[in-house]
């Protein structure tokens, strides 16, 4: 479904009072951005001009019909203004509500250092594993209607306790990942161009609330992986062969699937707390597919990188530098 189709359906559902809470938020977001105002006015025109007029009045006083139609259009435009006002009021009230909630809810923030992995047990019995160099924020007690945590940076593998009355949402930048009960992995490192979500059990809904776009939702099931570019919003889908591809890092494995050496160096730096650099920036664009075990030493991994890419390395002042042969 393209943008226009989505917007048209959203308008129709709004006019028919059929919007879900999520669709209502998307509708008001588009109104606030001015992206559907013209389309909404056209729909109001159609709706209003199809009302039955008195047939005798039309026959005897053709100007009366014109005045009625103009009046109806005027009322339609007034309705649009009311909708716009309602949208602004909705967002204003929502922000106040969120601010009030934040003022009374206590949060915990968990951070991991380079080379560190932490296991976190949440108030609802869900379990999260936090990868190296990551930050997670969550409430000490979840609300009555929803369970929400914020992955501020890094990577987390989540095993969510099933509760059909309280959806679980992980926010990572503009991306919301929502489930009832399942297991999945989210990678949200600043040095990566994309946010990725991989599902190992159950089903998840991933929504991208990117700037100047209507929310784009994707449904993933076990074995699915989605990558969303942080800048362009471009989405790519793929499959994970086994659960290890998504959660192998929780047991110390390092799995690289066609990753650039620049990304690989960042991951290794986080895992081993050692800086890895390049003598020539072009080397960062080389790619690698490989799996390393938790017992593999950093220098052994670096040697494999060099052999597979015809490179060499040197160690200076606690820093490893890759270079051409």
Image (cartoon, grey):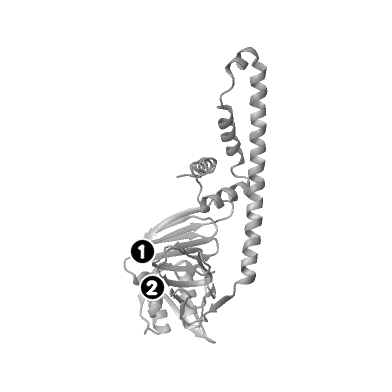
Between the C-alphas of marks 2 and 1, the distance is 15 Å
Count of numbered labels shown in the rendering: 2
Report the front residue among 140 and 274: 140
Name the N-terminal-most of marks 2 and 1: 1
Up-down: is 55 above or below 226? above
- Residue under label 1, please give it: 202
Q: Judge by depth and name the residue closer to the eye, 234 or 151.
A: 151
Q: Which mark is residue 247?
A: 2
Q: Are marks 2 and 1 in contact (CB under 8 Å)?
A: no
Q: Position of residue 71 (x, y in %)?
A: 67, 28
Q: In the rendered view, would you say 159 is above or below 206?
A: below
Q: Position of residue 44 (x, y in %)?
A: 59, 34
Q: Is residue 255 left or right of residue 217?
A: left
Which is in the foreground here, disc 2 or disc 1? 1
The answer to which of 238 and 39 lies nearer the viewer is 39
Quarter of the image with the C terminus is bottom left
83 or 114: nearer the viewer: 83
The answer to whether residue 151 is above or below residue 55 is below
Q: Helix, strand, or loop for circle 1?
A: loop
- Where residue 107 appears, as percent x and y from the top left, is 58, 75
Question: Picture coordinates of residue 38 (x, y %)?
Answer: 61, 38
């Amino acid at each position: 479904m393209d943008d226009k189709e989505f917007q048209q359906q959203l308008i129709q559902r709004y006019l028919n009072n059929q919007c879900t809470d999520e669709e209502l938020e998307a509708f008001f977001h588009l109104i606030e951005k001015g992206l559907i105002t013209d389309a909404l006015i056209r729909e109001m025109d159609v709706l209003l001009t199809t009302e039955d007029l008195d047939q005798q009045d039309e026959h005897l006083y053709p100007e009366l019909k014109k005045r009625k139609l103009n009046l109806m259009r005027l009322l339609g435009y007034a309705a649009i203004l009311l909708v716009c006002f309602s949208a602004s009021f909705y967002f204003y009230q929502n922000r106040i509500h969120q601010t009030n909630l934040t003022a009374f809810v206590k949060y915990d923030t968990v951070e991991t250092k380079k080379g560190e992995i932490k296991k976190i047990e949440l108030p609802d019995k869900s379990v999260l594993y936090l990868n190296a160099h990551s930050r997670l924020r969550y409430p000490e007690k979840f609300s009555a209607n929803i369970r929400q945590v914020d992955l501020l940076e890094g990577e987390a593998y989540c095993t969510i306790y099933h509760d059909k009355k309280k959806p679980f949402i992980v926010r990572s930048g503009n991306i919301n990942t929502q489930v009832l009960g399942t297991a999945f992995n989210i990678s949200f490192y600043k040095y990566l161009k994309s946010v990725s979500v991989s599902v190992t059990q159950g089903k998840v809904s991933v929504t991208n609330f990117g700037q100047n776009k209507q929310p784009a939702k994707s449904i993933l099931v076990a074995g699915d992986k989605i990558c969303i570019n942080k800048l362009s919003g471009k989405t790519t889908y793929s499959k994970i062969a086994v659960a290890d591809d998504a959660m192998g890092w929780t047991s110390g494995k390092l799995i690289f699937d066609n990753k650039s050496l620049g990304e690989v160096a960042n991951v290794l730096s986080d895992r081993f707390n050692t800086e890895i650099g390049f003598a020539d920036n072009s080397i960062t664009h080389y790619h690698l597919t490989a799996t390393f075990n938790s017992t593999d030493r950093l220098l052994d991994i670096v040697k494999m990188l060099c052999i597979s890419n015809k490179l060499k390395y040197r160690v200076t002042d606690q820093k490893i530098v890759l270079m051409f042969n």
